[in-house]
Amino acid sequence: MEQRRVYGKSQWYHETQARNQAADVLPLVPEAAHVADRFLLDLTLPEQVSDECQPWLHLSSKIAVHLFPNDVTVTRLNTFSAYDRLSTALTVAQVFGVQRLCNHYAARLAPLPGPDSSRESNHRLAQITQYARQLAGSPSVICSASRQQLDAVGLSVPDIVLMAQIVGFVGYQARVMAAGQALLGLPVRWLPGMPVQDEAPASLFETQTQDWKSDLAAIENHNFSNLQLNALLPLLAWDNLLLKLEIDLLDALNAEPDYTTLVAVLNARINGSASCFWQHAQDESLLLAIQEGENALQTWGQNNPAALAVIQAVQLLTKAPDRFSAAQFTPLIDNNRSPAQAFTLLALSGINGWLNRLKIGLGEALPVT
């Protein structure tokens, strides 16, 4: 009798419906699971760049280990298992199309037992996957109803917050990975055809917003202080260690002050975070150009080659990290910026995308009253 070959979770594209498989299932690149650095995934940067960026790279690696430990204890309040975490990470990695990330999370996910085959478990996993895919690739579509759907399948507030953290972190990781591979002249993707993220609708930014409000239960007692995370602090305090690492990471990346505001506003406009957009709004002419669209923004930057290089790099890295290359990285260096400074600036863009998705995924901006 001809032996039937079972593929299970070995395919690169992750399906939402899982099943338990008695036989061992191997990913396409099994060695991708075994890396010394779970953030850069053993991507070897030039020594000078690695040394200068070590503070924020080290913190990023600590966050990766914290979010994706080998073993996770599931409780009534924290139902997100190791499988849920890695399944969500793989979904996000697929949205951004960075092959090295896809290989890593697929390799770590493959040997784990999936949830049972009940209708409830399948529905829960489908909702998790849909939410992660939308928050990663089309963040502006997320709303209160999206969070209510997660609640309906049994996710707790800490679960929803953790999921938003995972989506944001893997998006940040994808962009740092893309920037690092562009620095080395390496291709980011191996498979063509990943869609480019559309800019959020301009209507989201027609009315100035400053306040932000969540419809999720928060922890009010926290001792941290950070302007960029201020409104989110009570929610993120469900995981104090992760919150502390995030604050330290933000401080480390903000040590590169040039074009910080430009990068933050660009990211917020593309991703659809009105709260983040108006938080960083300063230059009126820049805001008008960003609100009017990409062509107006390119015109705004014509008289400032350094700013134009930042605009073009951040736009592509935000919309399609899998297409980012040396063609966008090199102009940053050509405008009096060292490779380490350019790399850090792009990492700052990545963490802004993380903050955008936290604000969008966990609450809504409120108009100025």
Image (cartoon, grey):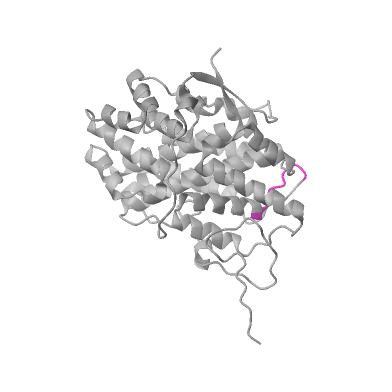
Give residue 71's quadrant in the image. Answer: bottom right
Rendered location of residue 2, percent (x, y) = 63, 85
Residue 269, relative to residue 129: is it above or below?
above
Q: What residue do we see at 61% from left, 70% from top? A: 25
Name the side, left or right, on which 194 lies relative to 297.
right
Question: Number of callouts in the render?
Answer: 0
Give residue 154's quadrant in the image. Answer: top right
Q: What residue do we see at 77% from left, 57% from top? A: 118
Rendered location of residue 122, percent (x, y) = 71, 54
User: Is residue 279 a member of the stretch shown in magenta?
Assistant: no
Q: What residue do we see at 47% from left, 31% from top? A: 201
The magenta segment is 76-83
Residue 214, relative to residue 60: is it above or below?
above
Taking depth in this image into account, of 124 and 226 the one nearest to the observer is: 124
Q: Quadrant of the N terminus?
A: bottom right
Name the side, left or right, on which 191 lies relative to 155.
left
Name the side, left or right, on which 284 lies relative to 75.
left
Rendered location of residue 38, percent (x, y) = 51, 54
Q: Quadrant of the C terminus?
A: top right
Q: Which residue appears farthest toward the bottom when viewing the image?
A: 1
Majority secondary structure in the magenta region: loop
Let me know if residue 13 appears in the view: yes
Let me know if residue 238 appears in the view: no
